[in-house]
Image: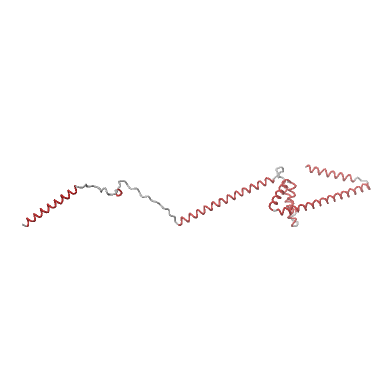
Amino acid sequence: MIAASARASAKLAAGASIAIIAGTSSALMSKPVYCEEGPSSSGASKLSIYPEPDPKVEIVPVQTELERQIGSARRSLAHLTTDTRHSVRSLVDRWISIERSVEGEVKSLIPESEPLTPGLLYVGVATLAGSIFTRYRAFPIRILTPPLALIASLNFFNPHLAHNLGAYYTEVEQEYLPALTEQRRNLQNQGKKYLDSTTKNIHEMKDKTEQGVRSGLETVEQKTGLKVGDVVAAKDEAKYAIKDQMKAV
């Protein structure tokens, strides 16, 4: 009996299992079955068949303290070099302008109608001779003789050059030292007056001496009968002729 009851319960269990499987099959067949994910899933979660691009890498430069110090030093050196270059260039331009102005002044002072040689050579020799001849004299004479010899010889051998130099000196003096110009003019006027008076006195003394000599010669001629006046007159004529020849040369 026990075996019969066991077989009966086994049959009942098998029938129940078959019924459950049949119900499940009918339920599954009533709905569509998808092999992939349902349509409700988003497209972003799908895997692409192409390789994804590499992410963009942004490099942010970061300077260290040493780099900042080096950059500051280089900029300072560049500014200093630029300023120095500008200063040197301006100095060179200024020097060139000074050279051109000096060259123009020198060309304006040199006369075209008067050769510089050998006049300047004679001027140098006269100045050096004045210094040599007065080397054992008093200190004022030793100091004043060379410049006086220079001025006198320059006016004698190169009068046009001396005139141009004097005019240039007067112009510079009036521009920078007007008070000295007035004093120099006063001294020149006084010196000219003294020179004129001295020259006049010398000529008067010479005339008086010649008159005295002539009167003495006339007295000698009257007392002795010798023609001394004719000899003196011939001597004077010869002297004047020699002077005329020297001027012509």
- Nearest to the observer: residue 129 or residue 105: 105
- Nearest to the observer: residue 10 or residue 156: 10
- Nearest to the observer: residue 161 or residue 69: 69
Q: Where is residue 170 in the image (x, y as percent from the top left)?
A: 71, 50
Is 73 situated left or right of 178 in this image? left
Work out which residue is located at the far right of the displayed protein and give it: 223
Q: In which quarter of the image is the N terminus?
A: bottom left
Is 71 situated left or right of 155 in this image? left
Q: Position of residue 172 (x, y in %)?
A: 69, 50
Q: Which colour scheme is used?
A: secondary structure
Total numbered circles:
0
Q: Quadrant of the C terminus?
A: top right
Is 147 situated left or right of 78 in this image? right
Work out which residue is located at the far left of the displayed protein and give it: 1
Q: Position of residue 247 (x, y in %)?
A: 79, 43
- Nearest to the observer: residue 4 or residue 67: 4
Q: Where is residue 13 in the image (x, y as percent from the top left)?
A: 12, 54
